[in-house]
């Protein structure tokens, strides 16, 4: 299967437009169309549903799209392993928002200084999404806070993953001014939690310790950043759980109080047997710190 055709399919699937995909890839639209037709003929399935100039992925196209990032990642991995990392390559790193803000800048700068030919790509998301992306090869490694159910080596091994604890985070429940007197979760009167979407481990911890149940009196306000969550708490509309390291980076008003909600570790996850030189050098940064 032609790898260039896979890259073209991935671009068309992202843009849902031959013209935009051609512009993105620096090709003429007719070449993109021909490549897609060759790929469909090779697979024996229609990958896109065409309605005039409008494109949508077919059922077969949706299924195929799940495999394409893995095939491209495997090709990239093989090239760098066989070449001993001489080309530098690309290291795709996934991270929780909190870790990207408070922990990653220093090690990323150190790695880049030592390995200037390796391109670093950083993306953020909730733990559940990141774990799935490293499992299917879309990401090379991720920094996540793991649910208690999959923190042990055997559970990770069943998922084809290796995990290395790299940071220990103290968790705080940020309270609005109306809850300054609260000293336990049971005393919190506010009934709204600001959190990331489902799949965030910190959200799960908050829901468990606050006794939030579906259909109960609590409401979840889903927000996309800790800045927005802190602002919502300052406005008196909700509480939010976040690491102390993130709170210390913010300009949260002094009038806001916090409750200690225990601690958890941030893990660096990769696929078992992942040997590309760019990642092995990256991993050594954290193993040295641990030692």
Image (cartoon, rainbow, N blue to C red):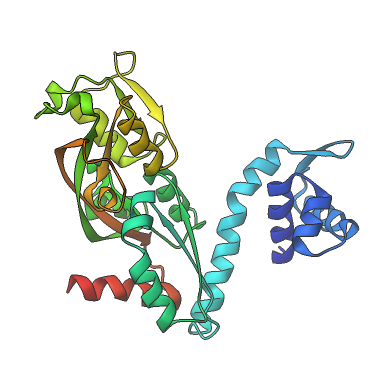
Residue at position x 25%, y 72% from top?
287
**Image side of residue 58 versus residue 88, left or right:** right
Q: Determine whether 262 is above or below 102 in the image.
A: above
Residue at the image position 31 percent from the left and 55 percent from the top: 157
Q: x, y (%) of residue 268?
A: 32, 60
Residue 117, x across and y down, in percent: 52, 81
Q: Can you tell which quarter of the image residue 38 is in? A: bottom right
The N terminus appears in which quarter of the rendering? bottom right
Q: Tell me the quarter of the image containing the C terminus.
A: bottom left
Q: Residue at x 80, y 65 (%)?
A: 26
Q: Looking at this view, is 225 or 253 the one in front?
A: 253
Nearest the camera: 98 or 91?
Answer: 98
- Judge by depth and name the residue closer to the eye, 40 or 137: 137
Nearer to the camera, 55 or 155 = 55
Asked where in the image residue 72 lies, by quadrant, the reply is bottom right
Q: Is residue 210 above or below residue 4?
A: above
């Amino acid at each position: 299967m032609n790898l260039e055709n896979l890259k073209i399919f991935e671009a068309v699937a992202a843009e849902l437009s031959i013209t935009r995909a051609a512009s993105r890839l620096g090709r003429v639209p007719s070449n993109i169309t021909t490549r897609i037709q060759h790929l469909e003929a090779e697979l024996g399935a229609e990958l896109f549903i065409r309605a005039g100039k409008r494109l949508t992925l077919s059922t077969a196209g949706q299924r195929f799209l799940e495999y394409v990032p893995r095939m491209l990642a495997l090709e990239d991995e093989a090239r760098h392993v066989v070449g001993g990392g001489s080309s530098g390559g690309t290291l795709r790193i996934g991270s929780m928002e909190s870790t990207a803000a408070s922990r990653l800048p220093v090690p990323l700068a150190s790695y880049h200084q030592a390995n200037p030919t390796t391109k670093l790509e950083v993306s953020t998301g909730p733990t559940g999404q990141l774990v799935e992306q490293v499992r299917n090869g879309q990401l090379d490694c991720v920094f996540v806070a793991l649910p208690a159910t999959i923190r042990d080596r055997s559970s990770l091994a069943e998922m084809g993953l290796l995990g290395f604890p790299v940071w220990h985070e103290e968790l705080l429940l940020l309270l609005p001014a109306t809850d300054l007197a609260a000293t336990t979760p049971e005393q919190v009167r506010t009934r709204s939690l600001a959190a990331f979407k489902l799949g965030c481990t910190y959200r799960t911890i908050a829901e468990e310790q606050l006794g939030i149940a579906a259909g109960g009196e609590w409401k979840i306000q889903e927000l996309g950043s800790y800045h927005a969550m802190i602002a919502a708490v300052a406005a008196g509309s909700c509480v939010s759980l976040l690491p102390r390291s993130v709170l210390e980076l913010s300009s949260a008003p002094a009038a806001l109080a916090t409750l200690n909600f225990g601690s958890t570790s941030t893990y660096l996850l990769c696929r078992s047997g992942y040997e590309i030189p760019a990642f092995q050098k990256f991993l050594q940064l954290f193993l040295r710190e641990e030692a």
